[in-house]
Image (cartoon, rainbow, N blue to C red):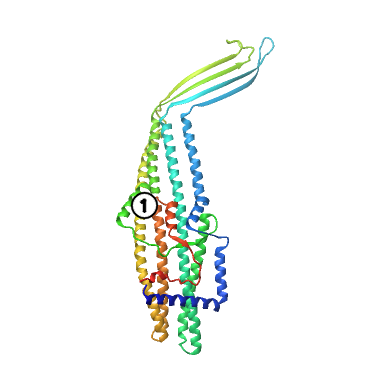
Amino acid sequence: MSSVSRIKVMKLSKLLKNTWLLRKSANPASALLAVSVCASLGVSAHAADLLNVVDVALQRNLSLSSAQTNLSATEYELDISRGNFLPSLNVSANTNWNDGTTHQYNGGNANNSYNNHGVNVTLTQSLFDLGDIYSHRNTQTDIDIESLRTEQTRQQIIREAATTYFEYLKNRAQIRATQAELESSESRLTLVSRNIELGNVAGTERYEVLAQKERTADSLRTLKKDQRIILNSLANIVQQPLKPDFDLQSSIQFGAIPPSRQTELNNIMYASDLSLLIAKQAVTRSRQVLKETGAAFVPSVKGSIGYTYDDTNDASAKLYPDKGVTEETVYTLTLDVPILNGGRDYYRYQQNKVDIDRTEIDLQDSKNASQQQFEEFIYNINDFSASLTSLTTIIQANYASYIGIQKAHKLGTRTITDLLSAESKLYSSIRDYESARYDYVINLIQLNERIGNLNMATVGKIAEQMSPMSDDSSQSPIPLHLMVQ
Protein backbone atom coordinates (compact mmCIF):
# COMPACT_ATOMS: atom_id res chain seq x y z
CA MET A 1 0.00 0.00 0.00
CA SER A 2 1.39 3.45 -0.90
CA SER A 3 1.83 6.02 1.84
CA VAL A 4 -0.88 8.23 0.31
CA SER A 5 -3.37 5.38 0.20
CA ARG A 6 -2.51 4.36 3.76
CA ILE A 7 -3.14 7.90 4.99
CA LYS A 8 -6.49 8.01 3.16
CA VAL A 9 -7.57 4.72 4.70
CA MET A 10 -6.62 5.86 8.20
CA LYS A 11 -8.48 9.14 7.75
CA LEU A 12 -11.62 7.42 6.51
CA SER A 13 -11.52 4.88 9.35
CA LYS A 14 -11.08 7.67 11.88
CA LEU A 15 -13.88 9.67 10.27
CA LEU A 16 -16.28 6.76 10.41
CA LYS A 17 -15.37 6.00 14.01
CA ASN A 18 -15.93 9.61 15.06
CA THR A 19 -19.30 9.83 13.30
CA TRP A 20 -20.49 6.62 14.99
CA LEU A 21 -19.45 7.90 18.42
CA LEU A 22 -21.22 11.18 17.68
CA ARG A 23 -24.30 9.24 16.60
CA LYS A 24 -24.43 7.25 19.86
CA SER A 25 -23.92 10.28 22.08
CA ALA A 26 -26.38 12.46 20.16
CA ASN A 27 -29.21 9.94 20.17
CA PRO A 28 -29.04 7.62 23.21
CA ALA A 29 -32.62 6.46 22.74
CA SER A 30 -31.80 5.07 19.28
CA ALA A 31 -28.65 3.46 20.65
CA LEU A 32 -30.71 1.76 23.34
CA LEU A 33 -33.11 0.52 20.66
CA ALA A 34 -30.20 -0.95 18.70
CA VAL A 35 -29.02 -2.77 21.83
CA SER A 36 -32.53 -4.09 22.40
CA VAL A 37 -32.71 -5.41 18.85
CA CYS A 38 -29.39 -7.22 19.21
CA ALA A 39 -30.53 -8.67 22.52
CA SER A 40 -33.76 -9.92 21.01
CA LEU A 41 -31.82 -11.67 18.27
CA GLY A 42 -29.53 -13.40 20.75
CA VAL A 43 -32.01 -14.61 23.34
CA SER A 44 -31.27 -18.24 24.24
CA ALA A 45 -28.95 -18.48 21.24
CA HIS A 46 -25.62 -20.26 21.50
CA ALA A 47 -22.70 -19.00 19.46
CA ALA A 48 -21.30 -21.63 17.13
CA ASP A 49 -18.89 -22.19 14.28
CA LEU A 50 -19.89 -23.71 10.95
CA LEU A 51 -18.89 -27.29 11.77
CA ASN A 52 -20.73 -27.17 15.09
CA VAL A 53 -23.93 -25.92 13.44
CA VAL A 54 -23.84 -28.63 10.76
CA ASP A 55 -23.05 -31.32 13.34
CA VAL A 56 -25.96 -30.29 15.56
CA ALA A 57 -28.26 -30.23 12.52
CA LEU A 58 -27.30 -33.80 11.61
CA GLN A 59 -27.95 -34.95 15.17
CA ARG A 60 -31.25 -33.15 15.79
CA ASN A 61 -32.96 -32.37 12.50
CA LEU A 62 -36.37 -34.03 12.39
CA SER A 63 -36.42 -34.62 8.62
CA LEU A 64 -33.21 -36.63 8.83
CA SER A 65 -34.48 -38.55 11.86
CA SER A 66 -37.64 -39.41 9.95
CA ALA A 67 -35.63 -40.60 6.93
CA GLN A 68 -33.38 -42.79 9.09
CA THR A 69 -36.40 -44.28 10.86
CA ASN A 70 -38.08 -45.02 7.54
CA LEU A 71 -34.90 -46.77 6.35
CA SER A 72 -34.87 -48.96 9.46
CA ALA A 73 -38.50 -49.90 8.86
CA THR A 74 -37.81 -50.69 5.19
CA GLU A 75 -34.97 -53.05 6.13
CA TYR A 76 -37.52 -55.31 7.85
CA GLU A 77 -39.16 -55.83 4.46
CA LEU A 78 -36.13 -57.89 3.45
CA ASP A 79 -36.69 -60.28 6.36
CA ILE A 80 -40.37 -60.44 5.50
CA SER A 81 -39.68 -61.38 1.86
CA ARG A 82 -37.05 -63.91 2.95
CA GLY A 83 -39.82 -65.79 4.76
CA ASN A 84 -41.15 -66.97 1.37
CA PHE A 85 -38.11 -69.26 1.06
CA LEU A 86 -38.37 -70.76 4.54
CA PRO A 87 -40.72 -73.59 5.62
CA SER A 88 -43.95 -72.83 7.41
CA LEU A 89 -45.32 -74.98 10.23
CA ASN A 90 -48.97 -74.90 11.25
CA VAL A 91 -50.60 -76.72 14.14
CA SER A 92 -54.35 -76.89 14.71
CA ALA A 93 -56.40 -78.67 17.37
CA ASN A 94 -60.14 -79.24 17.67
CA THR A 95 -62.61 -80.71 20.07
CA ASN A 96 -66.34 -81.27 19.64
CA TRP A 97 -69.11 -82.54 21.87
CA ASN A 98 -71.72 -84.50 19.96
CA ASP A 99 -75.16 -85.03 21.46
CA GLY A 100 -77.56 -86.96 19.20
CA THR A 101 -80.94 -88.70 19.52
CA THR A 102 -82.35 -91.23 17.10
CA HIS A 103 -86.18 -91.44 17.04
CA GLN A 104 -87.50 -94.99 16.44
CA TYR A 105 -90.96 -96.44 15.75
CA ASN A 106 -90.17 -99.59 17.65
CA GLY A 107 -88.69 -99.24 21.08
CA GLY A 108 -87.40 -96.16 22.79
CA ASN A 109 -85.31 -93.41 21.28
CA ALA A 110 -81.56 -94.08 20.98
CA ASN A 111 -79.38 -91.43 22.59
CA ASN A 112 -75.71 -91.13 21.63
CA SER A 113 -73.42 -88.53 23.31
CA TYR A 114 -69.67 -88.54 22.81
CA ASN A 115 -66.57 -86.29 22.47
CA ASN A 116 -64.54 -85.92 19.28
CA HIS A 117 -61.06 -84.30 19.28
CA GLY A 118 -58.02 -84.20 17.06
CA VAL A 119 -54.70 -82.54 16.15
CA ASN A 120 -53.34 -81.57 12.72
CA VAL A 121 -49.70 -80.60 12.00
CA THR A 122 -48.67 -79.36 8.53
CA LEU A 123 -45.15 -78.50 7.32
CA THR A 124 -45.08 -76.61 3.99
CA GLN A 125 -42.06 -75.63 1.88
CA SER A 126 -41.96 -73.70 -1.38
CA LEU A 127 -39.62 -75.55 -3.72
CA PHE A 128 -39.69 -73.30 -6.77
CA ASP A 129 -41.43 -69.93 -7.27
CA LEU A 130 -39.88 -67.31 -9.56
CA GLY A 131 -42.27 -64.68 -8.21
CA ASP A 132 -40.76 -65.01 -4.73
CA ILE A 133 -37.23 -64.77 -6.11
CA TYR A 134 -37.88 -61.53 -8.01
CA SER A 135 -39.93 -60.14 -5.14
CA HIS A 136 -36.94 -60.63 -2.83
CA ARG A 137 -34.68 -58.81 -5.28
CA ASN A 138 -37.17 -55.95 -5.52
CA THR A 139 -37.15 -55.62 -1.76
CA GLN A 140 -33.36 -55.31 -1.75
CA THR A 141 -33.63 -52.62 -4.42
CA ASP A 142 -36.22 -50.79 -2.31
CA ILE A 143 -33.75 -50.76 0.58
CA ASP A 144 -31.01 -49.45 -1.71
CA ILE A 145 -33.30 -46.65 -2.90
CA GLU A 146 -34.28 -45.78 0.66
CA SER A 147 -30.61 -45.71 1.68
CA LEU A 148 -29.88 -43.27 -1.13
CA ARG A 149 -32.82 -41.12 -0.12
CA THR A 150 -31.60 -41.06 3.46
CA GLU A 151 -28.16 -39.94 2.31
CA GLN A 152 -29.83 -37.38 0.06
CA THR A 153 -31.72 -36.02 3.04
CA ARG A 154 -28.49 -35.93 5.01
CA GLN A 155 -26.77 -33.85 2.35
CA GLN A 156 -29.81 -31.58 2.09
CA ILE A 157 -29.59 -30.90 5.82
CA ILE A 158 -25.87 -30.11 5.52
CA ARG A 159 -26.62 -27.77 2.63
CA GLU A 160 -29.51 -26.05 4.42
CA ALA A 161 -27.52 -25.55 7.61
CA ALA A 162 -24.39 -24.31 5.85
CA THR A 163 -26.12 -22.01 3.36
CA THR A 164 -28.33 -20.52 6.08
CA TYR A 165 -25.18 -19.92 8.11
CA PHE A 166 -23.69 -17.91 5.24
CA GLU A 167 -26.99 -16.17 4.53
CA TYR A 168 -26.74 -14.86 8.08
CA LEU A 169 -23.15 -13.70 7.52
CA LYS A 170 -24.16 -11.97 4.28
CA ASN A 171 -27.06 -10.26 6.00
CA ARG A 172 -24.80 -9.25 8.88
CA ALA A 173 -22.29 -7.65 6.50
CA GLN A 174 -25.07 -5.73 4.76
CA ILE A 175 -26.45 -4.57 8.10
CA ARG A 176 -23.00 -3.42 9.15
CA ALA A 177 -22.49 -1.36 6.00
CA THR A 178 -26.03 0.04 6.05
CA GLN A 179 -25.75 0.90 9.76
CA ALA A 180 -22.53 2.83 9.03
CA GLU A 181 -24.23 4.62 6.15
CA LEU A 182 -27.18 5.52 8.36
CA GLU A 183 -24.97 6.87 11.12
CA SER A 184 -23.05 8.92 8.58
CA SER A 185 -26.34 10.30 7.21
CA GLU A 186 -27.58 11.18 10.69
CA SER A 187 -24.32 12.94 11.56
CA ARG A 188 -24.50 14.86 8.28
CA LEU A 189 -28.13 15.79 8.94
CA THR A 190 -27.17 17.17 12.36
CA LEU A 191 -24.31 19.15 10.80
CA VAL A 192 -26.44 20.51 7.95
CA SER A 193 -29.24 21.52 10.33
CA ARG A 194 -26.72 23.41 12.45
CA ASN A 195 -25.25 25.18 9.38
CA ILE A 196 -28.74 26.15 8.23
CA GLU A 197 -29.42 27.74 11.60
CA LEU A 198 -26.15 29.67 11.29
CA GLY A 199 -27.08 30.70 7.75
CA ASN A 200 -24.05 29.01 6.19
CA VAL A 201 -25.96 26.79 3.73
CA ALA A 202 -29.31 26.84 1.94
CA GLY A 203 -32.25 25.20 3.69
CA THR A 204 -32.92 22.92 0.71
CA GLU A 205 -29.81 20.88 1.50
CA ARG A 206 -31.48 19.49 4.59
CA TYR A 207 -34.24 17.78 2.58
CA GLU A 208 -31.81 15.84 0.41
CA VAL A 209 -29.87 14.65 3.45
CA LEU A 210 -33.09 13.78 5.28
CA ALA A 211 -34.45 11.77 2.32
CA GLN A 212 -31.25 9.72 2.08
CA LYS A 213 -31.23 9.10 5.83
CA GLU A 214 -34.80 7.78 5.74
CA ARG A 215 -34.10 5.55 2.74
CA THR A 216 -31.12 4.09 4.54
CA ALA A 217 -33.10 3.65 7.77
CA ASP A 218 -35.82 1.81 5.86
CA SER A 219 -33.27 -0.52 4.24
CA LEU A 220 -31.68 -1.19 7.62
CA ARG A 221 -35.05 -2.01 9.14
CA THR A 222 -35.75 -4.54 6.38
CA LEU A 223 -32.30 -6.12 6.78
CA LYS A 224 -32.82 -6.59 10.51
CA LYS A 225 -36.20 -8.18 9.82
CA ASP A 226 -34.51 -10.54 7.37
CA GLN A 227 -31.91 -11.39 10.02
CA ARG A 228 -34.59 -12.53 12.45
CA ILE A 229 -36.11 -14.72 9.73
CA ILE A 230 -32.71 -16.26 8.92
CA LEU A 231 -32.01 -17.02 12.59
CA ASN A 232 -35.46 -18.59 12.97
CA SER A 233 -34.80 -20.72 9.89
CA LEU A 234 -31.44 -21.81 11.27
CA ALA A 235 -33.02 -22.66 14.63
CA ASN A 236 -35.63 -24.79 12.85
CA ILE A 237 -32.93 -26.69 10.97
CA VAL A 238 -30.81 -27.45 14.05
CA GLN A 239 -33.77 -27.62 16.47
CA GLN A 240 -32.21 -25.13 18.85
CA PRO A 241 -31.28 -21.42 18.77
CA LEU A 242 -27.79 -20.94 17.36
CA LYS A 243 -26.01 -17.78 16.30
CA PRO A 244 -23.03 -17.94 13.90
CA ASP A 245 -19.87 -16.47 15.40
CA PHE A 246 -17.26 -17.33 12.73
CA ASP A 247 -16.81 -15.40 9.50
CA LEU A 248 -14.80 -15.74 6.31
CA GLN A 249 -11.25 -14.48 6.54
CA SER A 250 -10.48 -11.43 4.44
CA SER A 251 -7.53 -13.21 2.84
CA ILE A 252 -9.60 -16.02 1.34
CA GLN A 253 -9.22 -16.45 -2.42
CA PHE A 254 -12.32 -16.83 -4.61
CA GLY A 255 -10.91 -18.42 -7.73
CA ALA A 256 -12.78 -19.51 -10.84
CA ILE A 257 -13.20 -23.19 -11.68
CA PRO A 258 -11.08 -24.00 -14.77
CA PRO A 259 -12.53 -26.08 -17.66
CA SER A 260 -10.44 -29.15 -16.79
CA ARG A 261 -11.79 -29.15 -13.25
CA GLN A 262 -15.33 -28.62 -14.57
CA THR A 263 -15.02 -31.77 -16.68
CA GLU A 264 -13.73 -33.71 -13.69
CA LEU A 265 -16.58 -32.51 -11.47
CA ASN A 266 -19.10 -33.30 -14.19
CA ASN A 267 -17.88 -36.89 -14.33
CA ILE A 268 -18.11 -37.12 -10.55
CA MET A 269 -21.69 -35.89 -10.72
CA TYR A 270 -22.77 -38.65 -13.13
CA ALA A 271 -21.17 -41.24 -10.85
CA SER A 272 -22.38 -40.01 -7.45
CA ASP A 273 -25.27 -37.54 -7.84
CA LEU A 274 -27.88 -39.02 -5.51
CA SER A 275 -30.88 -37.99 -7.57
CA LEU A 276 -29.38 -39.77 -10.58
CA LEU A 277 -28.53 -42.86 -8.53
CA ILE A 278 -32.10 -42.99 -7.23
CA ALA A 279 -33.48 -42.64 -10.77
CA LYS A 280 -31.17 -45.46 -11.97
CA GLN A 281 -32.33 -47.70 -9.14
CA ALA A 282 -35.94 -46.92 -10.06
CA VAL A 283 -35.27 -48.19 -13.60
CA THR A 284 -33.67 -51.35 -12.17
CA ARG A 285 -36.63 -51.94 -9.91
CA SER A 286 -39.18 -51.47 -12.71
CA ARG A 287 -37.37 -54.10 -14.77
CA GLN A 288 -37.36 -56.51 -11.84
CA VAL A 289 -41.06 -55.88 -11.27
CA LEU A 290 -41.65 -56.85 -14.89
CA LYS A 291 -39.81 -60.13 -14.26
CA GLU A 292 -41.83 -60.68 -11.09
CA THR A 293 -45.05 -60.12 -13.05
CA GLY A 294 -43.86 -62.48 -15.78
CA ALA A 295 -43.28 -65.14 -13.16
CA ALA A 296 -47.05 -65.39 -12.84
CA PHE A 297 -47.02 -67.38 -16.11
CA VAL A 298 -44.41 -69.86 -14.84
CA PRO A 299 -45.36 -73.05 -12.92
CA SER A 300 -44.50 -73.23 -9.23
CA VAL A 301 -43.79 -76.26 -7.04
CA LYS A 302 -44.67 -76.63 -3.37
CA GLY A 303 -44.27 -79.57 -0.99
CA SER A 304 -45.98 -80.29 2.32
CA ILE A 305 -46.23 -82.92 5.03
CA GLY A 306 -49.37 -83.22 7.12
CA TYR A 307 -50.07 -85.36 10.20
CA THR A 308 -53.59 -85.79 11.60
CA TYR A 309 -54.65 -87.43 14.85
CA ASP A 310 -58.39 -87.89 15.40
CA ASP A 311 -60.06 -89.53 18.42
CA THR A 312 -63.77 -90.20 18.14
CA ASN A 313 -65.18 -91.65 21.38
CA ASP A 314 -68.37 -92.83 19.72
CA ALA A 315 -69.61 -95.99 21.49
CA SER A 316 -71.83 -96.78 18.54
CA ALA A 317 -68.99 -96.66 15.99
CA LYS A 318 -68.94 -99.72 13.82
CA LEU A 319 -66.01 -98.69 11.66
CA TYR A 320 -62.54 -100.12 12.20
CA PRO A 321 -60.80 -99.44 14.51
CA ASP A 322 -63.40 -99.84 17.12
CA LYS A 323 -61.55 -97.53 19.53
CA GLY A 324 -62.41 -94.57 17.27
CA VAL A 325 -58.77 -93.37 16.97
CA THR A 326 -57.40 -92.45 13.53
CA GLU A 327 -53.85 -91.32 12.65
CA GLU A 328 -52.90 -90.17 9.18
CA THR A 329 -49.75 -88.78 7.54
CA VAL A 330 -50.07 -87.11 4.12
CA TYR A 331 -47.17 -86.22 1.82
CA THR A 332 -48.11 -83.70 -0.86
CA LEU A 333 -46.23 -82.34 -3.86
CA THR A 334 -48.17 -79.63 -5.69
CA LEU A 335 -47.40 -78.36 -9.18
CA ASP A 336 -49.32 -75.17 -9.88
CA VAL A 337 -49.61 -74.34 -13.58
CA PRO A 338 -51.34 -71.00 -14.27
CA ILE A 339 -53.60 -71.10 -17.32
CA LEU A 340 -56.18 -68.32 -17.20
CA ASN A 341 -57.26 -65.79 -14.60
CA GLY A 342 -59.32 -63.37 -16.63
CA GLY A 343 -56.28 -61.69 -18.24
CA ARG A 344 -55.23 -59.83 -15.07
CA ASP A 345 -51.65 -61.10 -15.15
CA TYR A 346 -51.31 -60.31 -18.85
CA TYR A 347 -52.47 -56.73 -18.51
CA ARG A 348 -50.40 -56.23 -15.37
CA TYR A 349 -47.38 -57.39 -17.35
CA GLN A 350 -48.17 -54.90 -20.14
CA GLN A 351 -48.65 -52.16 -17.57
CA ASN A 352 -45.22 -52.82 -16.06
CA LYS A 353 -43.63 -52.70 -19.51
CA VAL A 354 -44.99 -49.18 -19.89
CA ASP A 355 -43.73 -48.34 -16.40
CA ILE A 356 -40.19 -49.18 -17.51
CA ASP A 357 -40.51 -46.54 -20.23
CA ARG A 358 -41.68 -44.04 -17.60
CA THR A 359 -38.73 -44.65 -15.28
CA GLU A 360 -36.28 -44.40 -18.18
CA ILE A 361 -37.83 -41.07 -19.16
CA ASP A 362 -37.57 -39.91 -15.53
CA LEU A 363 -33.90 -40.94 -15.52
CA GLN A 364 -33.17 -38.89 -18.62
CA ASP A 365 -35.09 -35.96 -17.15
CA SER A 366 -33.02 -36.21 -13.96
CA LYS A 367 -29.83 -36.21 -16.02
CA ASN A 368 -30.92 -33.09 -17.87
CA ALA A 369 -31.93 -31.32 -14.66
CA SER A 370 -28.69 -32.25 -12.91
CA GLN A 371 -26.60 -31.09 -15.84
CA GLN A 372 -28.50 -27.81 -16.02
CA GLN A 373 -28.08 -27.10 -12.31
CA PHE A 374 -24.42 -28.15 -12.46
CA GLU A 375 -23.72 -25.64 -15.23
CA GLU A 376 -25.65 -22.91 -13.42
CA PHE A 377 -23.56 -23.36 -10.28
CA ILE A 378 -20.36 -23.30 -12.36
CA TYR A 379 -21.48 -20.13 -14.16
CA ASN A 380 -22.45 -18.47 -10.88
CA ILE A 381 -19.21 -19.38 -9.10
CA ASN A 382 -17.04 -18.14 -11.96
CA ASP A 383 -19.16 -15.00 -12.31
CA PHE A 384 -18.84 -14.20 -8.60
CA SER A 385 -15.10 -14.77 -8.84
CA ALA A 386 -14.82 -12.25 -11.69
CA SER A 387 -17.25 -9.86 -9.97
CA LEU A 388 -15.13 -9.75 -6.83
CA THR A 389 -12.19 -8.56 -8.88
CA SER A 390 -14.31 -5.86 -10.51
CA LEU A 391 -15.97 -4.87 -7.24
CA THR A 392 -12.57 -4.45 -5.61
CA THR A 393 -11.68 -1.87 -8.24
CA ILE A 394 -15.12 -0.26 -7.94
CA ILE A 395 -14.79 0.13 -4.15
CA GLN A 396 -11.34 1.66 -4.52
CA ALA A 397 -12.61 4.07 -7.18
CA ASN A 398 -15.76 4.98 -5.22
CA TYR A 399 -13.70 5.49 -2.09
CA ALA A 400 -11.29 7.86 -3.88
CA SER A 401 -14.24 9.67 -5.48
CA TYR A 402 -16.01 10.04 -2.14
CA ILE A 403 -12.93 11.50 -0.43
CA GLY A 404 -12.36 13.93 -3.30
CA ILE A 405 -15.98 15.10 -3.48
CA GLN A 406 -16.08 15.43 0.31
CA LYS A 407 -13.12 17.82 0.20
CA ALA A 408 -14.60 19.70 -2.77
CA HIS A 409 -17.91 20.08 -0.94
CA LYS A 410 -16.16 21.65 2.02
CA LEU A 411 -14.56 24.10 -0.39
CA GLY A 412 -17.94 24.82 -1.98
CA THR A 413 -17.10 23.49 -5.46
CA ARG A 414 -19.39 20.42 -5.25
CA THR A 415 -23.00 20.22 -4.10
CA ILE A 416 -24.50 18.16 -1.30
CA THR A 417 -26.20 16.06 -4.01
CA ASP A 418 -22.81 15.09 -5.41
CA LEU A 419 -21.57 14.13 -1.95
CA LEU A 420 -24.65 12.05 -1.11
CA SER A 421 -24.47 10.27 -4.45
CA ALA A 422 -20.79 9.44 -3.96
CA GLU A 423 -21.45 8.10 -0.46
CA SER A 424 -24.38 6.00 -1.67
CA LYS A 425 -22.27 4.49 -4.46
CA LEU A 426 -19.49 3.65 -2.01
CA TYR A 427 -21.73 1.78 0.42
CA SER A 428 -23.67 0.08 -2.37
CA SER A 429 -20.41 -1.27 -3.83
CA ILE A 430 -19.42 -2.51 -0.36
CA ARG A 431 -22.71 -4.37 0.00
CA ASP A 432 -22.36 -5.84 -3.49
CA TYR A 433 -18.83 -6.99 -2.68
CA GLU A 434 -19.85 -8.67 0.59
CA SER A 435 -22.86 -10.35 -1.06
CA ALA A 436 -20.68 -11.73 -3.87
CA ARG A 437 -18.26 -13.28 -1.34
CA TYR A 438 -20.97 -15.18 0.51
CA ASP A 439 -22.93 -16.08 -2.63
CA TYR A 440 -19.73 -17.62 -4.03
CA VAL A 441 -19.48 -19.93 -1.00
CA ILE A 442 -23.21 -20.70 -1.03
CA ASN A 443 -23.06 -21.78 -4.68
CA LEU A 444 -19.94 -23.82 -3.94
CA ILE A 445 -21.86 -25.70 -1.22
CA GLN A 446 -24.78 -26.26 -3.57
CA LEU A 447 -22.43 -27.52 -6.27
CA ASN A 448 -20.96 -30.10 -3.88
CA GLU A 449 -24.46 -31.30 -3.05
CA ARG A 450 -25.28 -31.54 -6.75
CA ILE A 451 -22.32 -33.84 -7.40
CA GLY A 452 -23.10 -35.90 -4.27
CA ASN A 453 -19.97 -34.79 -2.44
CA LEU A 454 -21.35 -32.67 0.41
CA ASN A 455 -20.19 -34.02 3.77
CA MET A 456 -18.46 -32.93 6.96
CA ALA A 457 -15.07 -33.04 5.23
CA THR A 458 -16.30 -30.63 2.56
CA VAL A 459 -17.72 -28.29 5.17
CA GLY A 460 -14.50 -28.62 7.18
CA LYS A 461 -12.44 -27.27 4.28
CA ILE A 462 -14.64 -24.17 4.21
CA ALA A 463 -14.54 -23.84 8.01
CA GLU A 464 -10.73 -23.81 7.88
CA GLN A 465 -10.93 -20.47 6.07
CA MET A 466 -13.08 -18.86 8.78
CA SER A 467 -12.15 -17.10 12.01
CA PRO A 468 -14.05 -15.70 15.02
CA MET A 469 -16.13 -12.61 14.37
CA SER A 470 -15.30 -9.22 15.78
CA ASP A 471 -18.20 -7.19 17.17
CA ASP A 472 -16.08 -4.06 17.50
CA SER A 473 -18.51 -1.28 16.53
CA SER A 474 -15.64 1.09 15.84
CA GLN A 475 -14.27 -1.10 13.07
CA SER A 476 -14.64 0.34 9.59
CA PRO A 477 -17.31 -1.35 7.41
CA ILE A 478 -15.08 -0.70 4.39
CA PRO A 479 -12.89 -3.76 3.60
CA LEU A 480 -9.61 -1.92 4.16
CA HIS A 481 -7.53 -4.80 2.83
CA LEU A 482 -8.86 -3.93 -0.63
CA MET A 483 -7.01 -0.61 -0.50
CA VAL A 484 -3.66 -2.38 -0.92
CA GLN A 485 -2.17 -1.17 -4.17
Say which residue appears at 50% left-offset and 64% top-offset: 227
In the displayed structure, 151 sits above or below 401; it is above
Q: Where is residue 44 in the image (x, y as percent from the top left)?
A: 58, 60
**So how many labels did they put on this image?**
1
Residue at the limit of the structure toward the bottom, as seen here:
199
Of 433 and 327, nearer the camera is: 433
Q: Position of residue 246 (x, y in %)?
A: 48, 61
In which image quadrant can residue 308 be found? top right
Q: Where is residue 36 in the image (x, y as percent from the top left)?
A: 57, 69
- Quarter occupied by the C terminus: bottom left
Of 469 and 46, nearer the camera is: 469
In the displayed structure, 181 sits above or below 231; it is below
Query: Can you identify the residue that label 1 sits on?
Result: 370
- Quarter occupied by the N terminus: bottom left
Say which residue appears at 34% left-offset and 56% top-offset: 375
Residue at the limit of the structure toward the left, as seen here:
260
Residue at the limit of the structure toward the front, as seen here:
3
Left or right side of 96 for 283 = left
Q: Where is residue 466 in the image (x, y as percent from the top left)?
A: 45, 60
Residue 167 appears in view: no
Say which residue appears at 64% left-offset and 12% top-offset: 315
Amino acid tagged 1: Ser
Q: What element carries label 1?
A: helix
In the displayed structure, 130 sits above or below 275; it is above
Residue 33 appears in view: yes
- Please rate how many residues cluster around mark 1, counting C-alpha atoms within 10 Å: few if below 14, some from 14 to 19, many from 20: many
Left or right side of 92 for 459 = left
